[in-house]
Amino acid sequence: MLTDFWTWILDMGNSKTVALLIFFTTFVGIIIYNYSSRRRSERLESYRYLPLMDEDEADKRVKAAEAASQAKGEK
């Protein structure tokens, strides 16, 4: 029975489906992890425009976000 299962998975037509399910569930897990906590979500949203900012402004925002997360007790 176990050998039948591995034979089914190793078939190229079925392995693509299994890989799709694994990657999709991983993607959904990452999304849920990132947006499940309001504090984490707010911190990540504060980094949204970081690549488009000047260095000084970006440094100030990163330091402010880190200070806010430490003040709230998040590591």
Image (cartoon, rainbow, N blue to C red):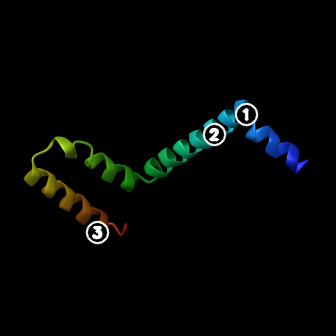
Query: Mark 3: which amino acid?
Result: Ala
Query: Mark 2: which amino acid?
Result: Ala
Q: Nearer the viewer, residue 9 or 39?
A: 9
Number of residue marks: 3
Q: Nearer the viewer, residue 41 or 31?
A: 31
The residue labelled by disc 3 is 71
Mark 1 or 3: the one toward you: 1
Query: Which mark sits nearer the N-terminus, 2 or 3?
Result: 2
| Relative image position of residue 65 (x, y in whole percent) | 24, 58
CA–CA distance in space, label 2 to label 1: 9 Å
Q: Residue at x 62, y 43 (%)?
A: 22
The residue labelled by disc 2 is 19
| Relative image position of residue 24 (x, y in whole percent) | 58, 39
In the rendered structure, find residue 33 and report the number of the disc placed on it.
none
The residue labelled by disc 1 is 14
Q: Secondary structure at mark 2?
A: helix
| Relative image position of residue 3 (x, y in whole percent) | 86, 48
